[in-house]
Amino acid sequence: MSRPHAGPDQARSIPARLARALDALRAEFSSPAIAVALSGGLDSMVLLHLAHAWARESGIHLFAFHVHHGLSPNADQWLAHCERECVQLGARFDHRRVAVDKGRSGVEQAARKARYAALGQMCTEHCVGLLLTAHHLDDQAETVLLQLLRGSGPAGLSGMDVANRAPSLLGTADVVMARPLLGLTRSELENWAREHALGWVEDESNSDPRYARNALRHQVMPALAQAFPGFQQRVARSAGHAQSAQRLLNALAAQDLAACLAGDALSLPCLRKLNEDRVHNLLRYWLAQRGIRMPSTSWLEQMAAQALDAREDAQLRVTHPECEIRRHRDHLYITPRLATLAAMRDPDDIGVIDREGQAFRWNGEAALAFPDYGGVLHFDSAPQGFDPAWLRAQLLQIDFRKGGERLKPAANRPTRSLKAHYQALGVPAWERERLPLVFAGYDLLFAAGIGMDCRHLVTEATPAVALRWESKPFL
């Protein structure tokens, strides 16, 4: 169905409104160059032309970045269209071809992730600090309605910001992603495009009702527009109220976090003084501050209940796709999930040891990184340690604890199980799982978190070599 054309006054106001938005963004986020994320569709083509006119008047370098997903048989034509339009305008153009890994998240989410990663790479390469996307008022309404249908809280109902940094999407914190068209409806953009005879491409996937956003866009929102004209502005206003409420919740969570934080952990006695709503609010904020994807409400409630109510000696372990939540001595910790390691064997080089782990040789390096074990093994000069010549001759192996290992830390101290050492040193049970051991054959030389076994230590070597483990910081 065709839409009525906007009047001349309204159409002429669109460049002025866009210019005001870009002037404000430029004042807040200085950048030597800006870029438009250009898909070739209606919205991004309007943004390209408007931003080009503003950049020319303002003396700003403008780029247009296109991402070729390869999902549509028309993708090559879209790329050619975007490049042709940029050549005609005199805008600098670049593009990336990406392979979309559907995985568990589905095509739509995987394509979004790949697209923003590619845009971030191009921004970094061309020293662009401000990336413009063509999201508009209808997109904002769709986002809020989708989040509402998913049962989201204030954070989800806040919709899209006019500008924000998104390092997890773009791969860099140096780029600001801005949405200068957020106050304009799609019909306003289409009317302006038709009046100025712009050409654009149509992505056939935008009509596929299997995608939730398309179903909402083509089936629900037209009915809302007929029954409640101008509903987009009211939904956007509600999103603004949700943003305000979320800022208050974040401020309260920041206060509670400051009161309950003990090093990297949360004090459970402090948490128990808060009511349930504040506990959940604090836990969401804590996870967000660590860059962890927000869990479902049911997961959060289960985690909070287990953390606060489990018996004191319980070894709490609540698993999240990106981390684990652990409890130790009435404190709550966020810990990494441990990778499952296969035996590392190279019979042509260093031989085979009959236990799982990673075999290696030391050739005098100051340190060796072991990413699969979450850290770096240092070889320090020390008055007491291993003879360097002897250590070089050994086939060494790094491995996680299997159980039953024993270590003698000094000649005047008994040989004890690693469990006994860890307990005496107060090492949390979950931390013991990620502290590696170093062997020479079947002899335990070193246990991270405890120290070296004395039976191979020497004092006459000048200098001796002492082993030290440095865990990679988590999040």
Image: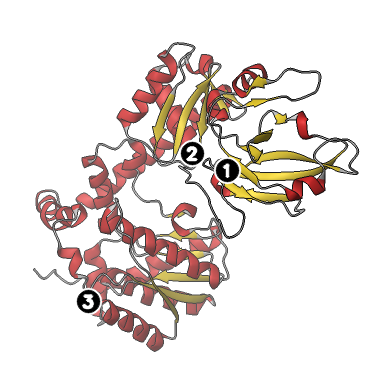
Which comes sooner in the sequence, label 3 or label 1? 3
Q: What element carries label 1?
A: loop
The numbered disc on residue 338 is 2
Number of numbered discs on residues: 3
Label 3 is placed on what type of residue? Pro
Above/below status of 419 relative to 179: above
Q: Which residue is drawn at 44% across and 22% down?
A: 316
The quadrant the C terminus occupies is: top right
Which comes sooner in the sequence, label 3 or label 2? 3
Estimate how packed mark 1 is, as few (under 14), some (14 to 19) or many (20 or more) residues with alpha carbons within 10 Å. Answer: some
The numbered disc on residue 374 is 1
Above/below status of 431 relative to 425: below
The residue where tag 3 is placed is: 73
The image quarter containing residue 378 is: top right
Seen from the viewer's position, the closer of residues 170 and 346 is 346
The image quarter containing residue 414 is: top right
Residue 91: x and y in percent read 44, 82
Q: What element carries label 3?
A: loop
Inspect this view and state whether residue 89 appears.
yes
